[in-house]
Image (cartoon, rainbow, N blue to C red):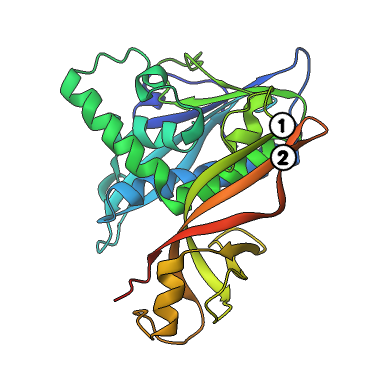
Amino acid sequence: MASAVLTEEDLDGAVGLYLDLKPNELVDLEVAAMAAIEWARGLKAAAVALDHSYDYRVSLIAAEPGSSRWMAKVERSKANQLAKDVKQGWEKVPLILRLTIGLAVVIPVTLKPTWDYWMGEEGFTEQQKQELREMLNEASQAPQVQAHRQSMYRQFQRDPTITSVGGGVPTSPEWRPDRTVPADQFAEGDGLFEPRREEDEERIVPQELDVILVTPRLENAPRAWTFRQEGIPGTFNAIMKDKRFLAALDRSAVRETFRSNIPMRIRLSIKQQKVDGEWRVARQGRVVTEVISPRVD
């Protein structure tokens, strides 16, 4: 079992996830376990999105009682190299990459005022900060990272004991991130919503997704198509309103063969309405405004 007693040496190569809890409360064990799995998978997905020439592993090195502070070591080895043992076969992930994946998995894209806000004061040069911003954008937008971030935040929402969540690179055994995502923004944290504005009763949220086509409607008309996302259970419907793509169907100009599991990248316009204080997708509220791929002639 991972120890709650850490040394400075233990933190070399580590990333952290921090949960603020209500006073004298402990997090639900099932929620903590399932969220930790999604966090670990998200770290690996973010690392792969930035550099897929390595294999990555995430090892839990410490968890406080109540699981309010988790520390994990991220290591990498060449993808085509079999490790004979841990010391020889695996190496630590560099600091900038660790900070990138530590933030990308925890900080929702829709909630960042700027990436500088979340980076803290780590002594980076302006060039390093720009590199971080670019890497954070790339990792955060990766579909697998988004999927694991969504699943992690959905677990957090199940336990009212959790009041905020933060992530990054631990700087001491008593580390707490400079900034955290409060519980009232966990719904945004699952990556599906823009920040809430209480005065709005209806809003339109744009979104770009990589999806798998489940059911097309092969006619030149605004009809509901069915899609699914890799790693996320269930399907969703969206009205196909990309006139250029629909016209291309008529003249057999879509560069795709008729088969199962056709990958697509689409731009959506999602209409949401506030019901009992929560934003929900309106009936027939998803519209495909543009098909980015497959390409059309």
Q: Nearer the viewer, residue 4 or 78?
A: 78
The answer to whether residue 121 is above or below residue 131 is above
Viewed as shown, does residue 127 lie left or right of 170?
left
Q: Are marks 1 and 2 in contact (CB under 8 Å)?
A: yes
Q: Quadrant of residue 257?
A: bottom left
Viewed as shown, does residue 139 lie left or right of 58?
left
| Residue identified by numbered label 2 | 273
| Residue identified by numbered label 1 | 201
Label 1 SS: loop
| Quadrant the C terminus occupies | bottom left
Spot occupied by residue 278 in the image (x, y as percentages of width and height): 75, 34
Residue 54 appears in view: yes
Residue located farthest toward the right when viewing the structure as drawn: 276
Q: Quadrant of residue 251?
A: bottom left
Mark 1 and mark 2: Cα distance apart in space? 6 Å
The answer to whether residue 273 is above or below residue 235 is above
| Quadrant the N terminus occupies | top right
